[in-house]
Amino acid sequence: MDALTIAQLGNPILRQQAETLTPSQYNDYAPFFAELEKIMLEHNGVGIAAPQVSESVRAFIVASRPNPRYPNAPMMAPTLMLNPEITWQSEETEKDWEGCLSIPGMRAKVSRSTHIDVRYHTLDGEVVSTRMEGFIARIFQHELDHLNGIVFLDRAD
Ligand SMILES: O=C(O)C[C@@H](Cc1ccccc1)C(=O)SCC(=O)c1ccccc1
Ligand SMILES: [Zn+2]
């Protein structure tokens, strides 16, 4: 697999509806997911979605860490989420800053639900259902948007 590159805004891949992964595909994609995490870390991202490296499948990584913008953000090991969904989201929302590896140099305030219940599959086929809040919930919502052809500027207040 040659080195992955990050698609920039304007690339139609970022505007597609990504395809659901079938469990039989999970292992075929294992090497790709390793590369996905590597390129996210190389770009100091706190998340990355497969369509951002031109692979239009429903998978992303969430990897919160404290950073200048979010000094209180929790430390969260990079977590690969397959076929992720939001099963409930709070009416309560919060506006805060976001950035995007596909739109370098831009920052905007975006309203996101402060609490969400999510469900996703892991690489070994487990189903995880959990509640997220705060910055991690924000990253999840940002990455899920990427799977539906939405970028944060579409939602900027
Ligand atoms: O483009 C992406 O999906 C990655 C994006 C994730 C994200 C950042 C901030 C809020 C929601 C989602 C980034 O990691 S942007 C670049 C970055 O390193 C960063 C930006 C703001 C805060 C922390 C990190
Ligand atoms: Zn993004």
Image (cartoon, helix red, strand yellow):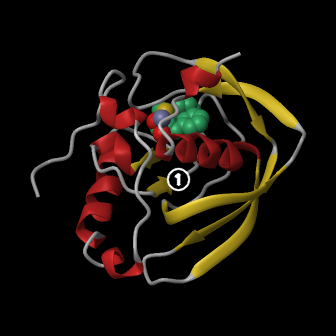
Q: Nearer the viewer, residue 47 or 116?
A: 116
- Residue 84 placement (x, y as % from top left): 57, 61
Q: Nearer the viewer, residue 157 or 41?
A: 157
Q: Quadrant of the N terminus?
A: bottom left
Residue 157 occupies quadrant: top right
Q: Nearer the viewer, residue 3 or 85?
A: 85
Give the farthest residue toward the left: 2
At x 35%, y 75%, the residue is 26
Q: In the shown orientation, is residue 148 left or right of residue 54?
A: right
At x 61%, y 55%, the residue is 75
Query: Relative to 97, is 61 above or below?
Result: below
- Residue 27 placement (x, y as % from top left): 30, 79
Q: In the shown orientation, is residue 115 left or right of residue 130?
A: right
Mark 1 highlights which residue?
63
- Residue 135 placement (x, y as % from top left): 69, 43
Q: Is mark 1 within 8 Å of ligand 1?
A: no
Dot 1, crowdedness within 10 Å: few (<14), some or many (≥20)? many
Residue 126 occupies quadrant: bottom right
At x 43%, y 16%, the residue is 105
